[in-house]
Amino acid sequence: MNPLNLARTPLSLAAGALMLAACGGGGNAEMPISDPLVSGTDVPASATTSSAAALAFVKTLAATGDNSTEPIRVGDVTLATSDTDEPDPSI
């Protein structure tokens, strides 16, 4: 093997790891919710009236994966359910 390639490999791996680590930063970005929230909570009103909207809201929360953000306020809100909707195969 070419000695030049062997010398560049660790450097390339280190640079790639640094770039990946830098991509994970973010800050305190708010979740984009387009419909109004239930009064005194962080839950969209549509999540209380539609099981599909409730599932979409929960999936949005699960996708954030940031344990350093403030907890959401749920109050006494009950998410919508359905006995007739088909189960979501993605969960």
Image (cartoon, rainbow, N blue to C red):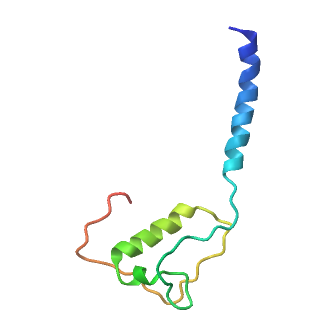
Query: Residue at 74% of width from left, 35% of height from top?
Result: 15
Residue lying at the far top in this picture: please name it. 1
Q: Which residue is drawn at 32% across and 63% down?
A: 88
**Percent coordinates x, y for residue 64 in the rendering:** 57, 63
User: For the image shown, how many numbered marks are present on the structure?
Assistant: 0
Q: Residue 14 vs residue 74: left or right?
A: right
78 above or below 26?
Answer: below
x then y, percent, for residue 18? 73, 41
Above or below residue 25? Residue 16 is above
Query: To which quarter of the image does residue 32 belong?
Result: bottom right
Vertical comparison of 79 with 26: above or below: below
Q: In which quarter of the image is the N terminus?
A: top right
Query: Is residue 19 rendered to the left or right of residue 35?
Result: right
Residue 46 picture quarter = bottom left
Front residue of this view, candidates 33 and 13 = 33
Q: Which residue is drawn at 70% across and 31% down?
A: 13
Tell me what residue is drawn at x 29 percent, y 77 percent: 82
Q: Is residue 66 left or right of residue 74?
A: right
- Residue 59, given in percent of the width and then of the height, sits at 46, 66
Q: Residue furthest left?
A: 84
Q: Quadrant of the C terminus?
A: bottom left
